[in-house]
Image: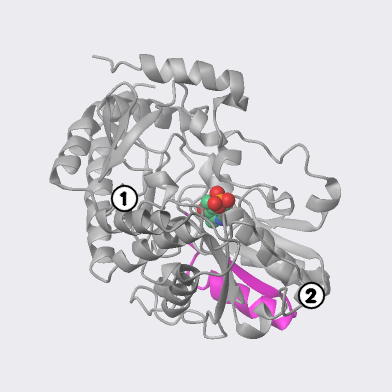
Amino acid sequence: MTLSTTASQVLFDRAREVTPGGVNSPVRAFRGVGGVPRFIDSARGPWLTDVDGNRYVDLICSWGPMILGHAHPDVLASVTDAAAKGFSFGTPSENEVALAAEIVERVEPLEQVRLVSSGTEATMSALRLARGATGRSVVVKFAGCYHGHVDALLAQAGSGVATFALPDSAGVPASAAGETVVLPYNDLGAVEELFAVRGEEIAAVITEASPGNMGVVPPAPGFTEALRRITSAHGALLISDEVMTGFRCSRSGWYGLETGAEGAHPGGYPSGAPDLFTFGKVMGGGFPAAAFGGRADLMARLAPDGPVYQAGTLSGNPVATAAGLATLRACTDELYPRLLETARTIADAASDALSAEGVAHTVQWAGSMFSIFFRDEPVRSFADAQAQDTSAYGRFFHAMLEGGVHLPPSAFEAWFVSGALDAEALDVIRAALPAAAQAAAAG
Ligand SMILES: *Cc1c(COP(=O)(O)O)cnc(C)c1O
């Protein structure tokens, strides 16, 4: 039996007339897996319902933000109340103070944050601040790490760029990319060599706290700490991009896991915390809110106190900040172990089904974020991630979709769970897996 996709197809055809590729963010177009993207009509709890009336268990969760599931009652109430009081003021308002305070309270090294509207804006602004503060221009990033579509960072990025296997993007001037050095992830030797030669030119190293945009590839033990040590020794800043991991891997993000505040990797960062952090996704609760932050002395370089300009008409929007605040407040200490248990249940079931069909795969973790790479060996870098069997993933993806489970439409993405996944949703996932594993095996 095949699900009807007539209404999605009609919308997709119309969308392609008025929007490039029919989508407003490339990975949504299903190019990595083929077929017709499902146009979603509504979402509640763990379910997405498309315009043809098909219902799917959601394992994308808007690429992370919907950590509580869809239309969570507390968030809905906060958003409704906020919207009733007006949509945007262009003046300061209380919710933005409360959201900033909640973020600063959760992530110990943060003293101040500035709110923006997207993760891209957060990383772009953090880079400008790092360059302004150091008076240097070179930025170091790692292959497979995605930091939004910032010109300087669209070099060997993961996410949609990985799906399309674009080495780079057209329209990024050589001058912008020329100030960026891309190194292989988890390769400390490469970092040391670069700093030995160009250490005085480097403004910052930016890294995903635990990469999720090439699939989940956690830092090797000691890698982040070594980045801290090396950057400090050369007067460069370390920017930890927690747009994806922030408030998802733990109540204080990957930082909480790596420092042992949340118990998993005690002893992280003996030589100090990252200088700057960036956040988005979960902290917006499904609305456009993101942030960057760090020590007060560094953040004081920003306008209006300092010379580094940064601004936004909708920054700290009262409705978006209401959604973010309500979401973070519902991200309690009780939620995180539950997410982890749910994620393990799903990953174990998927792994068992794939093993039963002899499909090569590896499961990798960052808190409750995980991905299944379709290859046997561990994935420690973007090159490793690219060596997987993406067509097997495509067949697996479509069989899962047919079985009522919406996975990320790319082999280079994390699977995201929500606190709303209940026994019924887990049953649907379990029931879909055997046929999907057979499809993956039928290459
Ligand atoms: C999603 C993401 C971004 C970009 O955020 P947008 O809100 O899509 O601009 C940046 N960095 C990381 C690590 C991300 O996962």
Residue 113 sits inside the magenta stretch: no
Query: For mark 2, does the 10 Å Cα neighbourhood hold few (<14), some (14 to 19), or many (20 or more) residues?
Result: few
Three-letter code for the amino acid on which mark 1 is drawn: Val
Horizontal side of residue 27 vs 360, given as left or right: right
The image shows residue 77, relative to residue 92, as above or below, that is: above
User: Residue visible at 24% across and 33% down?
Assistant: 433
User: Residue visible at 51% across and 28% down?
Assistant: 29
- Determine the secondary structure under disc 1: loop
Q: Is mark 2 within 8 Å of ligand 1?
A: no
Examine the image and state in which quarter residue 120 appears.
bottom right
- Determine the secondary structure under disc 2: loop
Residue at the spot of label 1: 417
User: Residue visible at 72% across and 73% down?
Assistant: 303
Image quarter in which the C terminus is found:
top left
Give the residues drawn in magenta, as a range.
217-240
Horizontal side of residue 15 vs 352, given as left or right: right
Three-letter code for the amino acid on which mark 2 is drawn: Pro
Color theme of the render: one colour
User: What separation in Å lies between label 1 and label 2 (alpha carbons)?
Assistant: 41 Å
The image shows residue 3, relative to residue 346, as above or below, that is: above
The image shows residue 75, relative to residue 390, as above or below, that is: below
The image shows a total of numbered marks equal to 2
The disc at residue 307 is: 2
Q: Is mark 1 within 8 Å of ligand 1?
A: no
